[in-house]
Amino acid sequence: MAIEVGGRTVETDEEGYLKDIGDWSEAVATSIAQAEKLDMTETHWGLVEAAREFYHDRGRHPSTHDLVAVLSHHLIKKHGEARHEVDRYLYKLFPYGPDKQLAKIAGLPKPLPADTE
């Protein structure tokens, strides 16, 4: 499969993940988000940037647990107190699964089951 972005063809797998993470750009992310029926907000873009940095720095996808821990820290609440609230918020932003949908829009490879635990 492929998507057309700015007059250029970008190859994706059958689920819409980029075949080459080097093809990622904000325009590509916007196109993927539109296909996912998401209106990107500043919060979405911040999480995309954080996911890309996490992947670059650690060589793995941020799990939903990682995202909750980071966001809980910013909410200045104990991890356990914020977990449910933050988890629900992430699913509002990425209704088809924060780990997989965020990875797709961030141009990262499809997470394996072990990446999402």
Image (tube, rainbow, N blue to C red):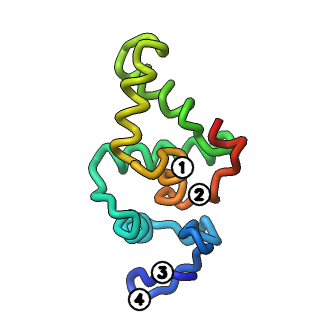
Q: At x 46% / y 66%, what residue is drawn?
A: 25
Residue 63, label in figure: none
Closer-to-camera residue (10/87): 87
Q: Secondary structure at mark 2?
A: loop
Q: Quadrant of residue 91?
A: top left
Q: Amino acid at mark 4?
A: Gly
Looking at the image, residue 32 lies above or below residue 95: below
Of the image marks 4 and 1, the number of the one nearer the N terminus? 4
Q: Quadrant of residue 74?
A: top left
Q: Disc 1 and disc 2: Cα gap in Å?
A: 7 Å
Residue 7, label in figure: 4
2 vs 4, front mark: 2
Dot 4: few (<14), some (14–19), or many (≥20) neighbours within 10 Å? few
Q: Which residue is mark 1?
A: 52
Of the image marks 3 and 2, the number of the one nearer the N terminus? 3
Q: Disc 2 and disc 4: Cα gap in Å?
A: 22 Å
Q: Secondary structure at mark 3?
A: strand
Looking at the image, residue 81 lies above or below residue 39: above
Q: Disc 3 and disc 2: Cα gap in Å?
A: 16 Å
Q: Residue 66 at x, y = what percent?
A: 56, 31
Q: Secondary structure at mark 1?
A: helix
Q: At x 33% / y 63%, what residue is drawn?
A: 37
Of the image marks 1 and 2, the number of the one nearer the N terminus? 1
Q: Which residue is mark 2?
A: 108
Of the image marks 2 and 4, the number of the one nearer the N terminus? 4
Q: Which residue is mark 3?
A: 3
Q: Disc 1 and disc 3: Cα gap in Å?
A: 21 Å
3 vs 4, front mark: 3
Q: At x 38% / y 44%, what residue is drawn?
A: 46
